[in-house]
Amino acid sequence: MAGTDSSIKLELRPTPAIILCEPQLGENIGTAARAMANFGLWDLRLVRPRDGWPNERAVAAASRADHVINRVRVFETLEAAIADLSLVYATTARSRDLQKAVLGPDEASGNLHSHISNGRGAGLLFGRERWGLLNEEVALADAIVTLPVEPAFASLNIAQAVLLMAYEWRRHSDLGTKLPFTDALAEVAPREELIGLFGHLETTLDGSGFFTAPDKRPTVINNLRTMLERGKFTSQEIRTLRGVISSIDRRHQRPNPNRQKPPGEEGNS
C-alpha cells in the first residue's frame, strides 16, 4: 500500500521500544523499522547485530523510515538495552519452561499503553531470525507475548512480528480509532433531495408506461425507494442520477435516428 506523505510532519509520541536481539540480516532490521514507522513507533534498539551498524541494506529496506533508522541505538548486552524500561515483554512462538504470564497481543498492547501513558518506559523483545530468544533473555522479561498462529507453522519473520505488535499498539492509542482520509468522504445528501429523486423517477416511469399493472405500482414504488435509500447517495450523486433520468425522459420523446424501420415503412418519409 503506497501512502507515504512527506508533507505531513511526524510527531514522535511516547511509544514502546522495539529491541532486536542479535539480528542477522540488515534487510530484517530495515523492514522492522518500516513496520514501526507505519504505526508511529520510532525507538529501535539493536543488541549485537551480526553485520554491525550502520547497515546499508537496513537503510534501503527501511524505505525512507529515516526517523527510525537515524535513531537506532546499539547495545552490547540485552541488560543494557532494557535498563531504562520498567515493563518488558518477550515475544515468542515457542513454549518455555518458565513461570511467566503469557499474554495475547491485545492484552499486552493495552498494558503497554497504560504503562507508557503514566510516563514510564516499556519495550518489546524480538529474537534472532533462526531461533528467536534464548531462555535467559526471556527470563529478563515481565511476561511472554505470543500470537494465535498455526502451531504447525508458528515462525514469523521479525518484521512481520514487529508489524503485528505495532498495529496492536496503535489500535490501543488515541490515534488507532480513526482511519486515514475518511474526512474526505462527502456527507449523505439531505432527505429532501432523496425524496426529490423519488418523485422525479416515479414521474418519468409513469410517463414512459413502465407501470403496466396499476395495482402493483405501490409495491414497485416501495421497492425502488428502498433500493435508492440504501445507496446513501451524496448530493452530487443525486444530481447525476437525476441527470440520467432526465436524459432518458427526453430520449423517448425524440426520434431515434438509429432505429430500424419496420418492413413497409422504408419508403415513407
Image (cartoon, rainbow, N blue to C red):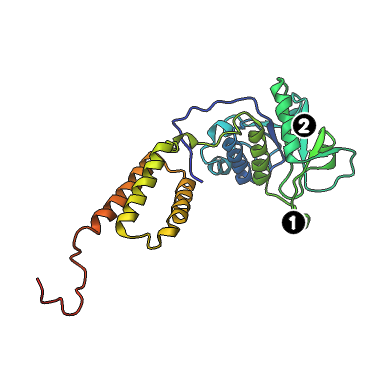
Q: Residue at x 32, y 53 (%)?
A: 204
- The residue carrying pointer 2 sits among few (fewer than 14), some (14 to 19) or many (20 or more) residues within 10 Å by Cα, namely many
- The residue carrying pointer 1 sits among few (fewer than 14), some (14 to 19) or many (20 or more) residues within 10 Å by Cα, namely few
Q: Where is 200 relative to 252, above or below?
A: above
Q: Quadrant of residue 56?
A: top right
Q: Residue at x 78, y 47 (%)?
A: 93
Q: Amino acid at mark 1?
A: Phe
Residue designated by label 2? 88
Spatial distance from mark 1 to mark 2, Cα to Cα? 26 Å
Q: Residue at x 73, y 30 (%)?
A: 112
Q: Amino acid at mark 2?
A: Val
Q: Where is 81 relative to 106, above or below?
A: above
**Picture coordinates of residue 225, whole percent (x, y):** 45, 49
Instruction: Tell whether 57 sits left or right of 156.
Output: left
Residue projecting furthest to the bottom: 263
| Mark 1 and mark 2 residues within 8 Å of each other at the beta carbon | no
Which element type, helix, strand or loop, lies under badge 1?
Answer: helix
Q: In the depicted view, which residue is nearer to us: 87 or 57?
A: 87
Any part of residue 129 in sight: yes
**Picture coordinates of residue 230, whole percent (x, y):** 49, 47
Residue designated by label 1? 153
